[in-house]
Image: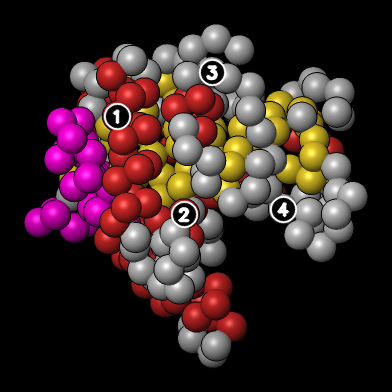
Amino acid sequence: MGTYKRVLLKLSGEALMGNLAYGIDPQVVEAIAAEVAEVVRAGIETAIVVGAGNIFRGIKGSAAGMDRATADYIGMIATVMNAMTLQDCLERIGIPTRVQTAIAMQEVAEPYIRRRAIRHLEKNRVVIFGAGSGNPFFTTDTTAALRAAEINAEVVFKATKVDGIYDSDPKINPDARRYRTLTYGHVLQHDLKVMDSTAIALCKDNHIPIMVFDLSTAGNIQRALMGESIGTIVGESFDVS
């Protein structure tokens, strides 16, 4: 596939949790930071969107009786904790990093300003987008698609706990088949749980491919961002395979 110039990496909050029941596993974050560092040192401009499922998930708060918008705002704030943790790990190994938030937190992070984010990337700084899109009812997957379009990223990498997209849940069905390539339309039509439908539609409308890959395999972030074909790629005109 060749090497990319500018990419966006989507990390779930759960990815930072490792095998813990809650919170952030420092060793996992350090391992992620080390792989991102190699990519940045290779000259690939890298932006990151982080979720907050390891700390607080808005939709679960809503299900427990909380006002949905309030629950989502709490989840957005939790993403900033993850973003700052990842920033700290990256800067400790010599990678200049900026956190930009969609909710103003000027004492700890920059506000999200598109042109400034692009300028940081051009200077080979990692930009971590926190606080989601700043709007309730939108997921951090949608934020990843939105920010990728805004910064003209060539691809969205979705790091998950499985090695791609399957036709059924591989944990339940041992005969589940992993797709190598998929079209956006197939993902939307069959409601495959890759990213939410808004995120898929945004990527489709802006011609941004999505690669879904397994974060737990050491070296996979580096492999994916350096252009190796791993996991499942969602794009415009693939045969379903």
**In whole angstroms, how far apart are the C-alphas of marks 1 and 3?**
16 Å
Residue indicated by mark 4: 193
State if disc 1 and disc 2 touch (CB < 8 Å). no
State if disc 3 and disc 2 touch (CB < 8 Å): no
Residues in magenta, as a range: 82-108
Q: Residue at horizontal 41%, vertical 45%?
A: 49
Callout 4 touching callout 1 (CB < 8 Å): no
**Callout 4 environment at 10 Å: few (<14), some (14 to 19), or many (20+)?**
some
**Which labelled disc corresponds to residue 119?**
none
SS at badge 2: helix
In the image: residue 9, left or right of residue 206 = left
The residue pinned by badge 1 equals 37
What amino acid type is highlighted by mark number 2?
Ala
- Residue 174 against residue 166 in the figure, above or below: below
Q: Quadrant of the N terminus?
A: top right
Indicate whether 16 appears above or below 231: below
| N-terminal-most mark, 1 or 3 | 1
Question: Where residue 82 appears, x then y in whole percent?
Answer: 32, 57
Residue type at mark 3 is Gly
Find disc 2 in the rendering and name its residue.
Answer: 15
Q: Which of the two residues, 194 or 28, is positioned nearer the viewer here?
A: 28
Q: Residues within 10 Å of mark 1 (few under 14, many from 20)?
A: many
| Residue 153 shows in this picture | no
Name the one closer to the observer, 135 or 238.
238
**Which residue is under mark 3?**
227
